[in-house]
Amino acid sequence: MGSAYLPIISIIIPTYNNVHTICSTLESCFNQTYSNIEIIVIDDGSVDDTKKILEPYIQKKQITYIYKTNGRAASARNIGLTHAKGEFIQFLDADDILLPEKLSMQISYLLEHPKTSGVYCDYFIAKQNKLSHYSAIKPIGNLYNFFLDSTFVLPIHAPLIRNKNLPHYNKSLQQNEDRAFWLEYFADESRKFGYIDIPLVHYCLHATNTTYNRVENIQNMLKLLHSLPSNQYTQASIVEHHGLLGFAFLEINKPLDARRELKIGIGTSNACRKLFFIGLYILSYSHTMYRYIYRISSYLRSFYKHKAIG
């Protein structure tokens, strides 16, 4: 990267009771090879020792610290966007990590591609003290249609984006607020993402993701889809998510609820998913259904392969 132009990158970090992880997250910011950054920490009403542990960083003016009453991450990110001075925005959760070359590589990419609105990177998943490399489809261009599919996952800290006419987060959402942000972001068809095929972040997954959470997550995804402007893509996604909700109900042995949702899902135009939902609908009448569903569920989880690195 040339030394003539080094734009500011604003790193926005909401935190709520992250006293055990926030320092590691901040150190990953300080360890960036790109140095022209500002770090904005929005304390979303923490009741632990977050303020105390951040005090040295505040005193050294290494971070801008903003305290607010609890209102969840969406409202905290909005405050960060309001205070951001940078030409580029880096979102970051208080338990995730940026690898040292992350900002340098992405800012170089965006300066070389001035018509690209953002660029995201590959990522490692950190779960139960194990680090894995996530392998999946990594699209480029306008990603609106990809975010209509709840199986498409993009950690909030994987992209670096230009700070230009950005939407704000929907504070009324209890879940899927990141996805809602990206859907509004990519509703502008001129916005395109590039991709760097190198894992440059750690994405922390917690052990709280249960089958019941999957039912709730898909139900909330359906609420989000119904709130979007209706077109062929959102309607197709709604149909498919009813089928996915049926599968989730089968996983917790609720065949009647599953059949109701699978009947809708069978209407999908996606041939592979149509066959999958038909198969699940037939299985829902079997007394040995749960054993087969468990096997299918295990297979699908292994389909999204993780290449273990330690």
Image (spheres, rainbow, N blue to C red):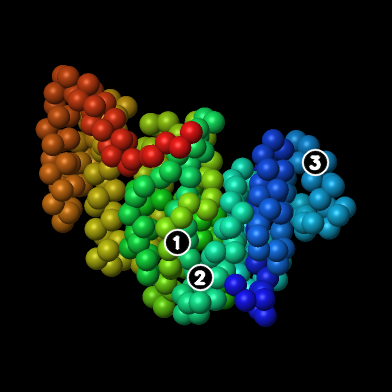
The answer to the question of whether label 1 and label 2 lie on touching residues, with beta carbons closer than 8 A, is yes
Dot label at residue 247: none
Dot 1 falls on a residue whose secondary structure is strand
- Distance between mark 2 and mark 3 Cα atoms: 35 Å
N-terminal of the two: label 2 or label 3? Answer: 3
- Which residue is outermost to the top? 287
Q: Residue at x 27, y 46 (%)?
A: 242
Q: For residue 238, what is the image quadrant?
A: bottom left
Pair 3/1: label in front = 1
Q: Is residue 23 visible?
A: yes
Type of amino acid at the residue the image marks with label 3: Ile
Q: Is residue 272 left or right of residue 6?
A: left
Q: Which residue is mark 2?
A: 109
Tag 2 secondary structure: helix
Query: In the image, is 38 to the left or to the right of 206?
Result: right
Marks 2/3 in contact by CB < 8 Å: the verdict is no
Residue 68 in percent (x, y) is at 74, 52
Disc assigned to residue 53: 3
Q: Which residue is mark 1?
A: 196
Q: Which residue sits at x=66%, y=50%? A: 28
Amino acid type of the residue tagged 2 in the rendering: Tyr
Amino acid, disc 1? Ile
Q: CA distance from mark 3 to mark 1?
A: 34 Å
Q: Residues within 10 Å of mark 1 (few under 14, many from 20)?
A: some
Query: Taking 109 as reference, is 289 above or below it?
Result: above
At label 2, counting other C-alpha atoms closer than 10 Å, the crowd grade (few under 14, some 14-19, many 20 or more) is some
